[in-house]
Amino acid sequence: MGREVKEKGPLTAPFPALMGPAMDNTRPIENSLDAFAGSKLAELEAKNQRRTLVDTARTSHMALSVNGGAPLISFTDNDYLGLSTHPDVIEAAKTATDKYGAGSGASRLVTGNHPLYRKLEQTIARIKGTEDAAVFGSGYLANVGIIPTLVGKHDLILADELVHTCIHAGMALSRATVKFFRHNDVDHAAELLAEHRANHGRCIIVVDGIYSMDGDIAPLRALGLLARQNDAWLMNDDAHALGTVGGGRGSAHACRAEGLVPLQMGTLSKAVGSYGGYLAASKPVIDLMRTRARSFIYTTGLPPAAVGASIKALEIIEREQDRVARPVKLAQDFAKAMGLPKPESPIVPLVIGSEVNALKASEALARAGFKVIAFRPPTVPEGTSRLRFSFSATHRDEDIKNLVGACEQLGLGA
Ligand SMILES: *Cc1c(COP(=O)(O)O)cnc(C)c1O
C-alpha cells in the first residue's frame, strides 16, 4: 500500500538539495568546447583545409547528383566495377534483408553471426587463395584490429611512408616500435631491418597493395623475399586492388607474390561495392583474429544486406574478367591521351600543388560535367594537392574522350 502512494505522488524534485539554482536554457552557451571547435575550424578554413559534406545521390553508370543539381559523371569513386548499383547485387542485398533482417542484432561472437558470413569468408579465401578469411565491420576496423593482435610493445613494424591512415591507427594501438621506409624503397626497408630487427621479437612489414592517392603498386615480391629473410610477416592492404588487378584477386596475384604475403587485408566497400573489411590468411591466424582482435569482437556484426551483396559481387568478380580488366584499361587510355605516365591501377593522380588551385581545377571540371575530387593535406603531403581520377568498368569510352577534352580546355595535364 505504501508503495502505491509513492508511485502516484506528485513528481516534485525528490532531492531538492542536488538541483542547484534554476538554469536559463534560452541563453546561448559560450563555453571552451565550442570556442575550441570554432577556432580550429577557422584555422583550417584559412589553409583551405576545411571539409564539408554534400548530398550525393548515386545512379547507374557513374552519374552523381550533387546537392540535387544536374548529374555529373564521377571520376572519383572507388566503385571500380559499378557493382554498388548492379541489379544482381542489389537483389542479393534485398534477399538477405528479407531472410535475416535489417540488422544483425549483436556482435558476431554473441548472436550476430548470421549464416551468410560463412559463405562470404569462404568466397574471400577462395579468391585470395588462403586457408581462411575473417570479415570485419570495415577496412578501418580490420586494420585497427589485425595489427595489435599480432604485435605489441616489444615488437617492430616497418611501414611504407604512404600507408593509409587506418594502418597508422592500428600501429599506434599496437604500441610496437614503428619505422617508416621511403615509398616503395625496398633497399631502405632492408637497411631499417638490418639496424632494428634484432632488437625486437615479432616483426610486421605493412604496405598498401595499391596506393590510393598515387595509384602505384607495392613491390610485393621483393618485400616478400626481404620479409622471409628477416623472419618478418608481410601485410598488404588491398583496399584498391581487390577486383581491379591480378585478375581481380588483388596485388599479391598481380605481383606473382601470393605465397610471400601471409596477411592479405582489404575492404568490401570499394570494387566489391558493398561494405565491410577482411583479412585473408592461414587458419591459425584467422582463428586468432576471431578470438582476440578487439575490433572484431566488440562491435556489432554487419547488416545481412551488406554480407549478401558482397557475396554476389565477389561471384561477379570471379566470373566476369572483362569487367575486372576494364578500369585499368580506361585509366591507361586516359593517361596516354593526357601525356601522363602509364598507370598500373585504375587510379591516375594529377598533382596540382596548392590547395586553392586543386580546388579551382575540381570546380572547373564540375562546371564541365565531371566530378573529380581535389585531395588536399593531410590526406596527401603538403604541396602535393591533386586531382585524383579513378576509372570504373561502367564508364563509357566516350566519357573518357569527353573528360580528356575538358582537361585540355582547362590546360590540365602534361
Ligand atoms: C578505403 C581504405 C581503407 C578503409 O576501408 P573501409 O572499408 O572504407 O573502412 C583502408 N585502407 C585503404 C588503403 C583504403 O583506401
Image: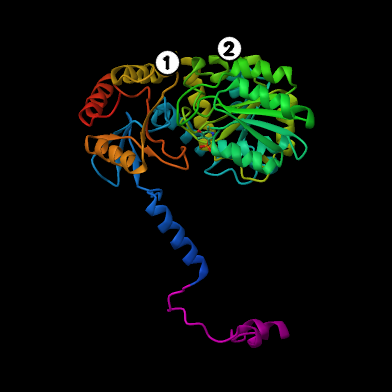
Task: Tell me the tag on residue 210.
Answer: none
| Residue placed furthest toward the top | 256
Position in image of residue 128 (x %, y %): 60, 19
How crowded pointer 1 is (Cα within 10 Å; few <14, some 14-19, many 20+) is rated as: many
Position in image of residue 186 (x %, y %): 60, 20
Q: Which residues are magenta?
A: 1-30
Which residue is drawn at the image coordinates 42% and 15% (left, top)? 325
Residue 13 position by quadrant: bottom right
Position in image of residue 145 (x %, y %): 66, 38
Q: Is residue 24 magenta?
A: yes
Q: Is residue 139 magenta?
A: no
Residue 129 position by quadrant: top right
Which residue is drawn at the image coordinates 52% and 43% (left, top)? 102
Mark 1 residue CB less than 8 A from any atom of ligand 1? no
Our reading of the magenta stretch's main secondary structure is loop
Q: Which of labels 1 and 2 is toward the front?
A: 2
Q: Amino acid at mark 1?
A: Ala
Task: Check disc 1 and report the residue beneath it.
Answer: 325
Q: Amino acid at mark 2?
A: Arg
Question: Mark 1 near mark 2, Cβ–Cβ under 8 Å?
Answer: no
The residue closer to the viewer here, 117 or 369, is: 369
Mark 2 residue CB less than 8 A from any atom of ligand 1? no
Classify mark 1: helix, strand or loop.
helix
Task: Check disc 2 and report the residue beneath it.
Answer: 256
Position in image of residue 410 (x %, y %): 22, 32
Image color mode: rainbow
Ranked by sequence position, the earlier of labels 1 and 2 is 2
Q: Estimate the spatial distance between the alpha carbons at disc 1 and disc 2, rounded to whole Å.
A: 17 Å
